Amino acid sequence: MRKTIAVHWQYGADTRSGWFHTINEDRSLLRLSTTEGRVPYAAAVIADGIGGSGDGELASELAVELVKDWLERRLPGIMAGTRPYKAIERDAADLFHAIHRKLREQAVERRQHLGTTLSMLVLSDSVYTIIHVGDCRVYRYDSDSNRLRRLTRDHTWVNAQVRKGLMTSKKARSHPKRHVLLQSLGMRGEPKLYIRSGYYDPESLFMLTSDGFHDCFSDGAIALLLQRASSSGEEPQRICDTLMFKAMERRPRDNISLLLIKPLGRKQAGHEAALRIRLLWHRWCMRAQALAGKYKL
């Protein structure tokens, strides 16, 4: 794919079936637009179907198509609101649960197992919002501080062991059960979604990856690759091409997908502090609502 530059964003994308698969069960989507008030926003989505015999491909395709419909019908109206990031969290969570139910219905009709991971990133007005389930990842890389942050949590058995202190991150990367999912769309029971919001600036590069990519590298290795690309002034599509080449050199067994997006613009004095206050207030309100419901205040 050639380098592509939008008015407010730079981005890059690539996907491969891997060395040992003929079917690619990964799906991704990028939507760039502006509100009626000319505020730019972007939405990036990645899904990795579960199966291996074509069922996973169907599940990820269906999930991304339903997200695409939501981006066209619902997101423009949400972005026109006064507090869009709060509405995005609520509305997108409803969307994920609707996709889960649709997959369950299709599984019964087809007498097949249909499951997929799904991660969505929405960027607008220096605020990012993530809705996520499964083991795809969303990273944020800040070139000015050379810091890579993993913004999502893997819903896997090995990650649960790491969080409990029963396994090291290094051992988890090669453990036989590293692909065993605890949460996905289409599995039995309602999925427990991971939802997160934060602020970003024009020095941020966001990267969405399927597990086929981050199986090849530790986070430290990814940060080093991004540092080298950033220091040479490479744009997102060139970075994407380089990362994919490095991954394919390792002869990965799984499908690999990458999606990179970077905002274009300048930092605004005081804007970061104001966003911190807005997001802290939003999180406090959400926590207060949760406690009120728990204790019936």
Image (cartoon, rainbow, N blue to C red):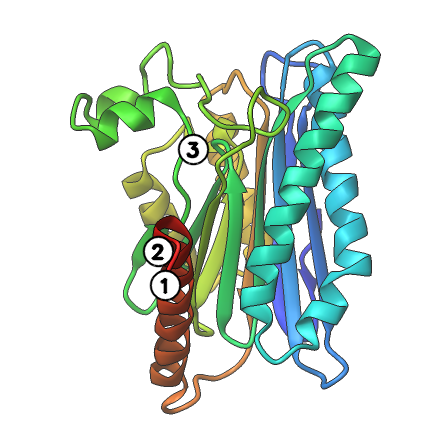
In the picture of the structure, the residue carrying the numbered disc 2 is: 291
Instruction: Please give the name of the residue rendered at 65% of the width and 70% of the height, measured from the top-left corner.
Output: 41
Whether the residues at callouts 1 and 3 have beta carbons within 8 Å, the answer is no
Whether the residues at callouts 1 and 2 have beta carbons within 8 Å, the answer is yes
What label does residue 288 carry, if any?
A: 1
The residue lying toward the viewer, choosing from 183 and 244, is 183
Instruction: Please give the name of the residue rendered at 47% of the width and 74% of the height, measured from the top-left corner.
Output: 202
Of mark 1 and mark 3, the one earlier in the sequence is 3
Q: Amino acid at mark 3?
A: His
User: Callout 3: few (<14), some (14-19), or many (20+) C-alpha neighbours within 10 Å?
Assistant: many
Q: Amino acid at mark 1?
A: Ala
Q: Kindly report which numbered mark, 3 or 2, lies closer to the viewer in this rendering.
A: 2
In the picture of the structure, the residue carrying the numbered disc 3 is: 214
- Which quarter of the picture shows residue 3? bottom right
Whether the residues at callouts 3 and 2 have beta carbons within 8 Å, the answer is no
Q: In the image, residue 251 lies at what x, y percent?
A: 49, 19
